[in-house]
Image: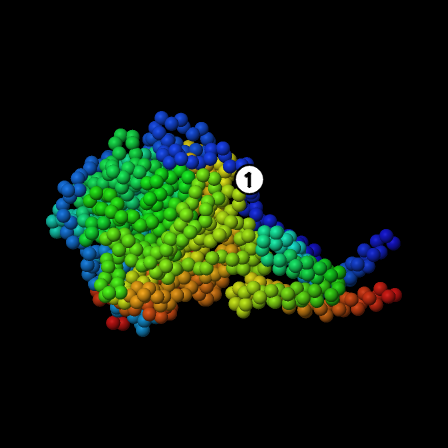
């Protein structure tokens, strides 16, 4: 059983429902955005700019990977990153809609999708934790 | 399920790569090897002598003494003789000196170039009823296979029974002002090859002769300068060439300019007639080479077309035409903005640009440095400067003067008035000068400016700031001003911002990494100029906040990018260089890469809006801002150039000025939303707008005919501003029977 741990990690791919595939896709997008944040954010920080992107990128990447792995924790990490984004945005530009648009609008839209995915992830976790116990 | 995965992966990877692209667009530090061994310095401020060995580079331009290429003298006109200024006949008072109430007699309405009309039929109360009275198609627009270089920028003039205008390629047209019916059209056959940066014809000039009696042909004339450098006079009644002017109605303005090719130099503004002298200036394509054709300003006898004087910056005491194969001094600052004539003082106010090879100043002479990016008051009988007022010292930011200056009477605290000119600049610093002396009436501070980054090219220690006028500019950029649709493009722009040198408005050019120019060469006030209401004292200014992102590159790197001047033997149109884009600056150690400070992927500017504003300043009561708001809605703008349809006034880039009417209205197009709008002069409120068939990048005008007030705007669009090109002039009026 060389591949057993690998199989366990991705067992939720088997017989996944359409909605579960969508959640997986969402996790992938969040992971890639997180990676982009980390790469660009480290670059920016080294140039003397904001540290927000590098830090937020770590949260996003971790959250996205956990969502791909079918963990509810991933969704909560994303929502944590979103909360951090709002706090940072308000600190940087205040309640200025035009400034909040690039910072918070897209992430909040994604956040709605992530929130909707929490029940799906929960169901998955319950299903596989019970199966895993057998 | 595999396809969405694939799509998402590709899209996400593309987004991931964005931050890297921020660096890749411009040369990394040290690219192309170290700066060349030829460190610039003294002794290089003069153009190469006639017997200098030719530059062996594949990318170089020809000798300045090389014969002019075919087509440069567009109509193969013989040379013109000279005439002494003392022999000029006295000029009769012109229509523009005191225009009839219903006329718009010159480019800026009247001799003062106020852009103010005493018409008051259209008012804030009835403006919402405006409708299209007629449209006119000029027939000039890009044909298949032609690059889009169009931006007509035309303002018609109206004198008596005629509405006179030019097409973007210089055909002169007389229309019936009530119907738009064409009365005559003088085709000038300007070729596509002669279009420089832009096919523009800002307007024509109406002139009444003192030599030809009333009732004879060419008593009243229409004068025009063309893209292919002809000065043309035709009869206002028939459109026939004036036989007593030049050679059959035309003068070759390429005489004495030396080596050139079509499209290198061009005239896009209406010629200015002052005391019997018609003064011509021309643009020279930016960024090509240090020894580009001269920026000489010349005066001709408006009756005969004979040469009167030249103002050649590097020959201050010699106002004659060059003989033989000699030419006016190469590479001198050129003037492409509309001139303002002052018949009373015998002056013409010339807004100047900087020397050729715009972003490197190491090879400029002291004579050039004294008059670049200035207002120069030339004596219209001699061509000698009477005074010079410099708005940017040793300009390497392309803050060339694009606006026509406006004459006005400036009130002083003791209740007197001073004859003044209002001088707008791309810096957003507006200077108000005593036009007799060139001294500033309002306080101006000399403030320290940063030292240079390029070896051998020092910067001026101070720059002038007109602190007595409201600054038409935004605060200096900060990282947090970066904008975008999402955090990803905002991150890209933050990296781009932090990757560049930026220490404010006078950040010097740099080789090691890009630098940000803000306001930059599209900022502040441009050729739309300002409008001034002499009755209320309200000054209307529309202006831009759109930074540029540039970097000097080594000659080796420039050659690898295939940058070569337009007149180089191996030059091909569309390859490498373009005006307001990358330029070879051949003959200097460096070339330039330059683009808007934007995200090239979404084609959105990197910083947050507004990008364009309109401001009303009360000139009679302490130069206070009466109102100021963003100009231009988001309706035709958005990422990837897609129209969002949103009505919000976000403030878009804008080009083209305003008109003020006694009715209390300001008419302006200018913004990239393709609207013309009417604004309440007192409150700034937008009362009416109308969608144009193309971009409204032109100064509107207004006139009255048969008791009906009309508002006309050329909806020609603008290639650089990416607004739709059209060949339509649209004329509005209230419905018949309203008044």
Q: Name the residue located 70 percent from the left edge and 55 percent from the top edge.
A: B2
Chain ID at mark 1: B
Position of the N terminus of chain B, as image quadrant, is: bottom right
Q: Which image quarter is the C terminus of chain B in?
A: bottom left
Residue placed at 29% from the left, 45% from the top? Answer: B281
Query: Viewed as shown, does residue B661 lie left or right of A4?
Result: left
Q: Which sits in the foreground, B307 or B648? A: B307
Q: Position of residue B209 (x, y in %)?
A: 16, 49
Where is residue B562? Give x, y as percent: 49, 37
Q: Is residue B74 visible?
A: no
Q: Is residue B609 above or below residue B556?
A: below
Q: Residue reaching furthest bottom?
A: B125
B89 vs B479: above or below: above
Nearer the observer, B484 or B192: B484
Label 1 sits on residue = B31
* Residue B497 visible to the viewer: yes
Q: Which residue sits at x=58%, y=55%?
A: A49
Viewer-proximal residue, A64 or B493? B493
Q: Nearer the viewer, residue B651 or B150?
A: B651
Q: What is the image's colouring?
A: rainbow
Residue at point 38%, 53% (across, down): B446
Residue B502 vs residue B324: left or right? right
Q: Residue B120 in the image: x percent, y percent?
A: 26, 68
């Amino acid at each position: 059983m060389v591949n057993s741990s690998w199989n366990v990690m991705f067992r939720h791919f088997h017989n996944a429902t359409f909605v579960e595939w969508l959640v997986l896709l969402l996790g992938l997008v969040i992971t890639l955005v997180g990676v982009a944040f980390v790469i660009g954010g480290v670059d920016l920080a080294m140039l003397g700019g904001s540290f927000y992107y590098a830090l937020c990128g770590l949260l996003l990447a971790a959250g996205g990977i956990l969502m791909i792995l079918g963990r509810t924790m991933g969704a909560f990490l994303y929502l944590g990153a979103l909360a951090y984004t709002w706090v940072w945005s308000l600190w940087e530009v205040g309640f200025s809609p035009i400034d909040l648009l690039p910072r918070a609008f897209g992430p909040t839209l994604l956040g709605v999708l992530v929130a909707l995915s929490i029940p799906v992830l929960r169901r998955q976790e319950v299903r596989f934790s019970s199966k895993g116990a057998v | 399920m595999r396809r969405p995965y694939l799509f998402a992966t590709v899209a996400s990877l593309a987004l991931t790569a964005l931050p890297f692209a921020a660096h890749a667009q411009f040369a990394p530090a040290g690219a192309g090897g170290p700066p060349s061994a030829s460190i610039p310095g003294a002794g290089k401020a003069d153009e190469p002598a006639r017997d200098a060995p030719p530059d062996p580079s594949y990318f170089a331009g020809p000798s300045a003494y090389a014969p002019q290429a075919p087509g440069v003298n567009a109509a193969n006109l013989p040379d013109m003789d000279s005439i002494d200024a003392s022999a000029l006949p006295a000029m009769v008072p012109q229509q523009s000196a005191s225009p009839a109430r219903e006329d718009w007699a010159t480019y800026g309405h009247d001799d003062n170039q106020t852009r103010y009309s005493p018409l008051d039929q259209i008012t804030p109360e009835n403006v919402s009823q405006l409708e299209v009275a007629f449209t006119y198609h000029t027939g000039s627009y890009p044909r298949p296979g032609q690059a889009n270089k169009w931006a007509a920028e035309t303002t018609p003039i109206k004198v008596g029974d005629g509405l006179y205008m030019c097409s973007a390629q210089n055909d002169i047209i007389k229309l019936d002002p009530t119907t738009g019916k064409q009365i005559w059209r003088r085709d000038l056959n300007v070729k596509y090859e002669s279009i420089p940066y832009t096919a523009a014809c800002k307007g024509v000039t109406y002139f009444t002769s003192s030599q030809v009696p009333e009732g004879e042909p060419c008593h009243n004339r229409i004068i025009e300068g063309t893209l292919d450098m002809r000065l043309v006079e035709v009869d206002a009644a028939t459109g026939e060439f004036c036989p007593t002017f030049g050679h059959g109605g035309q003068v070759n303005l390429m005489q004495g300019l030396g080596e050139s090719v079509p499209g290198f130099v061009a005239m896009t503004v209406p010629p200015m007639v002052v005391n019997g002298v018609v003064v011509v200036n021309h643009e020279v394509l930016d960024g090509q080479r240090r020894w580009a054709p001269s920026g000489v300003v010349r005066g001709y006898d408006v009756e005969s077309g004979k040469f009167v004087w030249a103002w050649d910056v590097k020959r201050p005491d010699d106002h004659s035409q060059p003989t033989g194969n000699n030419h006016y001094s190469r590479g001198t600052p050129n003037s492409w903005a509309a001139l303002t004539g002052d018949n009373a003082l015998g002056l013409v106010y010339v807004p100047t640009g900087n020397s050729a090879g715009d972003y490197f100043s190491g090879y400029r002479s002291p004579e050039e440095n004294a008059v670049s990016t200035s207002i120069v008051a030339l004596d219209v009988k001699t061509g000698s400067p009477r005074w010079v007022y410099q708005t940017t010292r040793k300009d390497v930011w392309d803050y060339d003067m694009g606006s026509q200056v406006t004459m006005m009477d400036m009130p002083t605290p003791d209740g007197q008035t001073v004859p003044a000119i209002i001088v707008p600049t791309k810096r957003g610093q507006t200077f108000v000068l005593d036009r007799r002396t060139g001294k500033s009436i309002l306080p101006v501070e000399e403030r320290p400016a940063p030292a240079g980054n390029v070896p051998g090219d020092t910067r001026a220690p101070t720059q002038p700031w007109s602190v007595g006028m409201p600054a038409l500019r935004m605060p200096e950029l900060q990282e947090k001003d970066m904008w975008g649709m999402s955090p990803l493009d905002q991150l890209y722009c933050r990296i781009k911002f932090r990757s560049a040198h930026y220490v404010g408005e006078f950040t010097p050019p740099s080789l090691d990494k890009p630098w940000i120019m803000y306001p930059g060469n599209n900022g502040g006030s441009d050729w739309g100029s300002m409008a001034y209401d002499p009755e209320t004292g309200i000054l209307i200014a529309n202006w831009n906040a759109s930074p540029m992102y540039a970097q000097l590159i080594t000659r080796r790197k420039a050659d690898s990018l295939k940058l070569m001047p337009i007149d180089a033997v191996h030059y091909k149109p569309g390859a490498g260089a373009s005006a307001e884009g990358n330029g070879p600056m051949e003959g200097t150690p460096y070339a330039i890469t330059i683009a808007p400070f934007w995200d090239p992927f979404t084609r959105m500017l990197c910083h947050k809006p507004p990008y364009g504003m309109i401001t009303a300043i009360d000139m009679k009561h302490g130069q206070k801002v009466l109102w100021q708001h963003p100009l231009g809605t988001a309706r035709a703008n958005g990422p990837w150039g897609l129209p969002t349809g949103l009505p919000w006034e976000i403030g878009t880039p804008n080009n083209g000025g305003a008109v003020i009417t006694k009715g209390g209205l300001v008419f302006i197009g200018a913004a990239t939303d393709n609207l013309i709008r009417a604004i309440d002069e007192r409150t700034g409120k937008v009362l009416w707008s109308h969608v144009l068939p193309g971009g409204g990048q032109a100064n509107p005008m207004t006139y009255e005919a048969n008791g009906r007030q009309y508002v006309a705007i050329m909806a020609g669009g603008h290639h650089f501003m990416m607004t739709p090109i059209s060949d339509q002039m649209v004329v509005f009026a209230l419905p018949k029977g309203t008044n």
